Image (cartoon, rainbow, N blue to C red):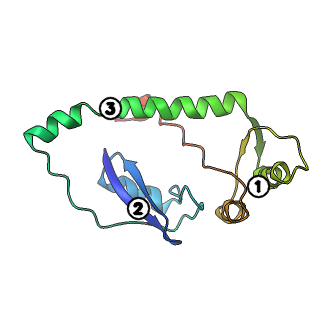
Amino acid sequence: MIRYALVCGAGHDFEGWFGGSDDFDAQSARGLISCPACGSSEVRKQIMAPAVVTTKGREAKSAGPSREMMMEMVSRVRRHVEDNFDYVGDAFAREARAIHEGRSEERGIFGEATPEEARALIEDGVPVAPLPQAPPDRRDLN
């Protein structure tokens, strides 16, 4: 796994984890990477210092969460949302705004929104967040 410091066109800093050095380029070219703050798919890598692991660093690093544990946590979050929230499809932006303005029943929802719709919701103070992508099926991995 490789961790990159990323920045969107609006200047929001965040990080992303990728399976290999070519994964960022491939996912970016397909429009699969977006800013968690504004939904922009105009994302680029920032300059980062390489991580040099010393003997002490190895001991500290091994105490941290493993990739499998992180992927399990992402899976649980996604599964919780899918099991407990209402799926509203491409009406997400319209329904989120209606709930925020009190015109629709308050409840948890999930669905799809364009980067522009997500940006407009955030700018208007509507509390939204991207749903973590489903981890790839282990059978599809090398």
The percent coordinates of residue 69 (x first, y second) are: 39, 29
- State the residue position of label 3: 66
The percent coordinates of residue 23 (x first, y second) are: 37, 53
Residue count near mark 3 (Cα–Cα under 10 Å), binned few <14, some 14–19, many ≥20: few
Q: Are marks 3 and 1 in contact (CB under 8 Å)?
A: no
Mark earlier in primary sequence (3, 1) = 3
Which of the labelled discs sits on residue 93, or is there none? 1
Q: CA distance from mark 3 to mark 1?
A: 35 Å
Left or right: 69 as drawn, with respect to 128: left
Mark earlier in primary sequence (2, 1) = 2
**Amino acid bearing label 1:** Ala
Between 106 and 136, the one lying in front of the other is 106
**Amino acid bearing label 2:** Leu
- State the residue position of label 2: 6
Left or right: 88 as drawn, with respect to 10: right
Quarter holding residue 81: top right
Residue drawn at 55 percent across, 55 percent down: 36
Between 22 and 53, the one lying in front of the other is 53
